[in-house]
Image (tube, grey):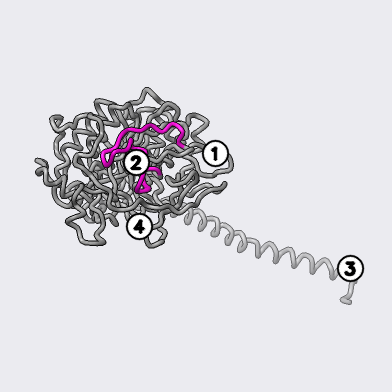
Amino acid sequence: MSRAWRPIAVAALLALSASLGQGSAAANRPPPIDPGRLPSGATPAPFEKTEQKLRCAETAPGGDGPTVPVGQRDLGFTSAWQFTRGAGQLVAVIDTGVARHPRLPGLVPGGDYVGTTDGTDDCDVHGTVVAGIIAAAAVDGQGFVGVAPEATILSIRQSSRAFQVAGRAEQQREGQTADGYGDIRTLAAAVVRAADMGARVINISEVACATGSLDDRVLGAAVEYAAVAKDVVIVAAAGNTDENCASNPGLDPLRPTADPWDQVSTIVSPAWYDDYVIAVGSVDSNGAPSQFTVAGPWLDVAAPGENITSLDPRRSGLTTGTIDDKGRQGVLRGTSFAVPYVSGTAALVRARFPQLSARQVIDRLKATAHAPAEGWNPLVGFGVIDPYAAVTADGGTNTVARPTMAAKALPLPGAAAPRDDRPRNIALIGAAAIGGVLVLAILASFPIRRRLHLSDTNAGAGSGATPS
């Protein structure tokens, strides 16, 4: 991604959360859920006093007009609107805040873990873009529209690159960037807050990324609570490699029986809580995996994450990028923006099939995706989502499972059966017999022809005829 702007990553403050202690599970597996670590649902507020060090990001206007953005065109989700537009669904966006916008008329403030707002201030120009992809209302003459335009957004500000713990500025060199604020603790608290406020879908376009071990048990308890106790569909980003988050190895064709979890070197949370979260990778405009997607055995589905157009938090129109303090424009791309396409589709499914549990909705999204040739891989999971299929396919509780990559020995071919030449021999003998008969017939005809010739000669002499 352009250095002018990058998707928010909780990894920026990972040292703070890691200092809370190490998890008890192996480094390549999520730790067991500990309900005792569930954070309270108290009114949102920063865990420490904070200060804003950097000025808020600016946006590059663009995308207005009848042209349909690439991701929207490729997913074709408007075809699903004859069945549902997501009415009645509350979708929580846990992010950098969602600014009030005329195309988000029902925006619900959910609180702020960074500053003192109600959650509807977006200094970082991230959460508003995410929310727009999910639920921006349709406007005549505008090609851009949200996946579930009748859904309602609940905004909870959980992180910001422009803020940091108060007092840190005195310890920093002149020109040094802000530390950022928001970590695993605030993310976990925001998940519980969203679930308690009645969200049916939670969009988490943020990640905590670490190599080795990570104590994220508080976040594990939060996503388990939301998914099981509150029946919420939780959609989380796979993470970006340009966010100092190294990718994991892909499938090894020389080790087809290997468990991909055994190859994990980089942890991405909450995406790796695969029993409770649907993890999303990004694809480009050609449908190929984006080069920045962090691979992992927890990948479930993919969606467009490049060439993004969405709501502008600074104006009433749209934006296609940001402008840094040196006037350089950066584009919007990342797994952060693939996630809201899936969240919007989950809202459509929940509105269409209210009887389905959160787990069944996730299974349905995976079962109706356009699977890669191998059925599943660690970059796109079960494939790119199909909103129309998700709301129309038969079988509301269909489930899928990652394919077993076990090698299977093929049996050696048996000995060839003896060749049967009888038909050929019969044909040859028959042909020879017919040929022999024809030869005999020709030879037998010579004496008859000779006698006939002699008779014709004698008859000519007796009549007085002379040669001409």
Magenta stretch contains residue 122? yes
Q: Determine the secondary structure under disc 2.
A: loop
Q: Which residues are magenta?
A: 104-128
Residue underneath mark 1: 139
Residue shown at 23% from the left, 39% from the top: 46
Q: Report how far apart the C-alphas of labels 4 and 3 lie in the structure.
A: 120 Å
Which of labels 2 and 3 is toward the front?
Answer: 2
Furthest toward the top, the residue is 355
Residue 157: quarter of image: top left
Crowding at dot 3, Cα within 10 Å, few <14 / some 14-19 / many 20+, comes out as few
Other residues around mark 1 within 10 Å, as few (<14) / some (14–19) / many (≥20) = few
Q: Would you say the magenta stretch is mainly helix, strand or loop?
A: loop
Distance between mark 2 and mark 3 Cα atoms: 133 Å
Label 2 crowding class (10 Å Cα cut-off): few <14, some 14-19, many 20+? Answer: many
- Identity, as a three-letter code, of the amino acid under mark 1: Val
- In the rendered image, the quadrant that contains the C terminus is bottom right
Q: Is residue 349 above or below residue 440?
A: above
Quote the CA–CA distance across marks 2 and 1.
Answer: 23 Å
Residue 367 horizontal/vertical position (percent) = 36, 36
Q: Residues within 10 Å of mark 4 (few under 14, many from 20)?
A: some
Residue receiving disc 2: 97
Amino acid, disc 4: Met
Can the viewer see residue 392? Answer: no
Going by the numbered disc 2, the residue's amino acid type is Gly
Specify whether 298 is left or right of 343. left
Where does the N terminus fall, quadrant-wise?
bottom left
Say what secondary structure mark 4 lies in.
Answer: loop
Q: Is residue 450 above or below residue 433?
A: below
- The residue sitting at 68% across, 62% down in the picture is 448
Q: Which residue is mark 3?
A: 463
Q: Which is in the foreground here, disc 2 or disc 1?
A: 2
